[in-house]
Amino acid sequence: MAFGGLYSPQIWGPGLASGFLVSRELLDRSACWVSIAPVLWLAYGVWDECRIYRFPPWHPPKGEFIHRAWHMFFTLNDAKEWGGAGLLLFLFTMPALSSIAYSVGAWFGFRFAQETHGQNFENGLLSPPK
């Protein structure tokens, strides 16, 4: 998938930009940890949706657990064929990707602010000039 669909910058770009801008202005390192909850939510979704007993006898699961997880949660074209649906992408995968982009942007914003403020930046907090 080139620059379309799930991995398009239209999906993760706003998260990256807003993470950078917010972290650069607020100088708060906690913005780098925003992605933990959505990634745990994605892990729960993968665990719950890819288990064998979730599939009815008339539609047995294809492949191994890891292959089902990849095709159900990270591809647009063949998610339905593997037992998934587009709804899984919107409920689990897109929030995780956006929050990861936000955390990466926050880290870059924090590093940018750290270099901009130079010596006034101690232990991750902006200290008053001496």
Image: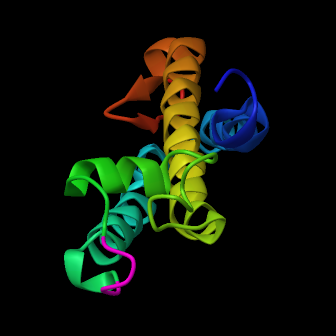
Most extreme residue toward the front is 58
Q: Nearer the viewer, residue 98 or 70?
A: 70
Q: Is residue 81 left or right of residue 13?
A: left
Task: State which quadrant residue 56 falls in.
Answer: bottom left
Residue name at image x 72 percent, y 33 percent: 8
Q: Is residue 54 left or right of residue 97?
A: left
Q: Is residue 115 above or below residue 40?
A: above
Residue name at image x 63 percent, y 35 percent: 7
Task: State which quadrant residue 17 falls in.
Answer: top right
Does the segment drawn in magenta span residue 93?
Answer: no
The answer, for residue 18, to whether it is visible in the render is: no
Q: Nearer the viewer, residue 124 or 74?
A: 74
Does the segment drawn in magenta span residue 57?
Answer: yes
Q: Nearer the viewer, residue 1 or 93?
A: 1
Residue 97 position, x and y percent, is: 54, 47
The colour scheme applied to this rendered structure is rainbow
Number of numbered markers: 0
* Dominant secondary-structure state across the stretch colored magenta: loop
Q: Is residue 95 above or below residue 44?
A: above
The answer, for residue 110, to whether it is visible in the render is: yes
Q: Is residue 79 above or below residue 12?
A: below
- Magenta-tinted stretch: 56-60
Residue 29 position, x and y percent, is: 43, 43
Residue 12 position, x and y percent, is: 67, 39
Quadrant of the drawing holding the N terminus:
top right
Q: Is residue 35 above or below residue 123?
A: below
Residue name at image x 40 percent, y 66 percent: 37
Q: Nearer the viewer, residue 93 or 121?
A: 93
Residue 121 position, x and y percent, is: 44, 26
